[in-house]
Image (cartoon, grey):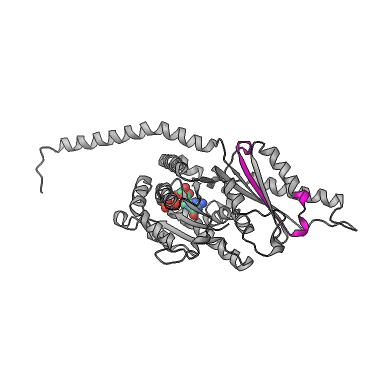
Amino acid sequence: MKIVVIGMGQCGGRIADEFAKLNNRARSQRGIEIVTGAFAVNTDAADLSGLTAISRDYQHRILIGGRKTGGHGVGKVNELGAEVAKEDADKVIDAIRTTKRFYETDAFLLIGSAGGGTGSGSLPVITQHVKQRYSDKPVYSAVVLPFEHEEQTEERTIYNAATCLKSTYSVADAVFLIDNQRYIRKDSSMANNLSKINALIAEPFYSILCAGEEKKPKYIGSKLLDAGDIMQTIVGWTVIGYGSSQVPLMRFPGDRSNDFRRKGTETQKGIQAMDAAISELSLNCKPEDSRRALYLVSAPPREMSVDLIKDLGDYLRNLAPYATIRNGDYPRQRGMLDVSVILSELSDVEKIRNYYTKSTKMIPQMKRREEETQDKLREIDDTSRDIPSLL
Ligand code: GDP
């Protein structure tokens, strides 16, 4: 599957940069292309300079809202992010048109954080514009949710997240939910290492995007996972994850591929990788709430049998009993058995519900505080009424 990736704001731009790196990897290691265009959109010029893989020209690193923000960002005001995105949406659409092999593109992926200003405000707006302009291609958004400490110290973060999620969901074909906090728990030394987190966020997409682009028969599995399968799966609230286990499997004397002991170990390794994928999903959710799912097994051809794919299918079916499940096998990896999983069309996501509930409670308080501030300012003005002005 080939995608155009557009990152908005600091977080979105950096993750789009990761996708550009994934494409370089696919090109050099596998001779295939998975990202036809990678763009970063920001109100902050300094953020755009920090990227490494996205082309440096102004049509790939796109500065918006220059007149309103002077190139210094929008603070945490996502309304301002949305406003400048509306004014400059054409800049982004014009830039997409320059994509060299645009006609090969299957879908768009737009990325931004929910808790900031530029990404949070511009993600829904640009999603809407891209959708209107390219109605024949699916437009997916990936929303990065804030760390817990950010939610606790700054109530604006929750309000931004709620408004961004609601607006993005209403225009995108699907919304990938990525919870920053999940990536800290895995390894606390990463707390401040956003670039490692960004690599972890992009990685699960690698095999899923590559599998359908292979042309050589030896890299094409018995069930090829192509763009059609992926597009049929991704709808509404969506999460993604992947896990791996070491192969080659332990060999037994006189080992044959159909030996019962070998089959047992193969299944065990596969389940281990799928368990890791499920427990490391990009957001904590209940798999039984998903209505569509897919899994892709990638491993050296010797380590992958039709039975393994079926056993994993049965395993996922138990976890997600109401989902239509699609699958694929990808005989490409060396020394590893990877399982990538997407759970989609989630009927409930507790974390999103909490953002909505908390913000709804917060709105009257925010209004009251704003009114109090205005009242106080008026009072000062009134007290100064008899003072002569120098102007
Ligand atoms: P914007 O530039 O105004 O859109 O603001 P940011 O993208 O910096 O948004 C702030 C939110 O994004 C906070 O929740 C940060 O934790 C998160 N964030 C900022 N940079 C990164 C990054 O590179 N990776 C990840 N995963 N999150 C980030």
Taking depth in this image into account, of 143 and 225 the one nearest to the observer is 225
Q: Relative to 112, is 190 on the left or the right?
A: right
Q: Name which residue lies at 30% across and 36% down.
A: 370
The image quadrant where one finds the N terminus is: bottom right
Q: What residue is shown at x 63% (from left), y 67% (from top)?
A: 29
Residues in magenta, as a range: 285-308
Point out residue 316 in the picture as x, y percentages from the top left corner: 69, 42
- Position of 4 relative to 159 (above/below): below
Camera sees residue 24: yes
> Is residue 183 highlighted in magenta?
no
Q: Nearer the viewer, residue 121 or 100?
A: 100
Q: Position of residue 22 (x, y in %)?
A: 57, 61
- Outermost residue, right side: 254
In screen coordinates, is 187 left or right of 331? Answer: left
Q: Residue furthest front?
A: 136
Residue 187 can be seen, yes or no: no
Residue 278 on image: x %, y %: 65, 44
Q: Is residue 305 magenta?
A: yes
Q: Nearer the viewer, residue 344 or 262?
A: 344
Instruction: Measuring from the top left, give residue 3's x and y in whole percent.
Output: 53, 57
Can you tell which quarter of the image residue 359 is in? top left
* Res. 346 image quadrant: top right
> What residue appears at the point 82 percent right and 56 percent down from the top-left corner?
250
Q: Is residue 146 left or right of residue 208?
A: left
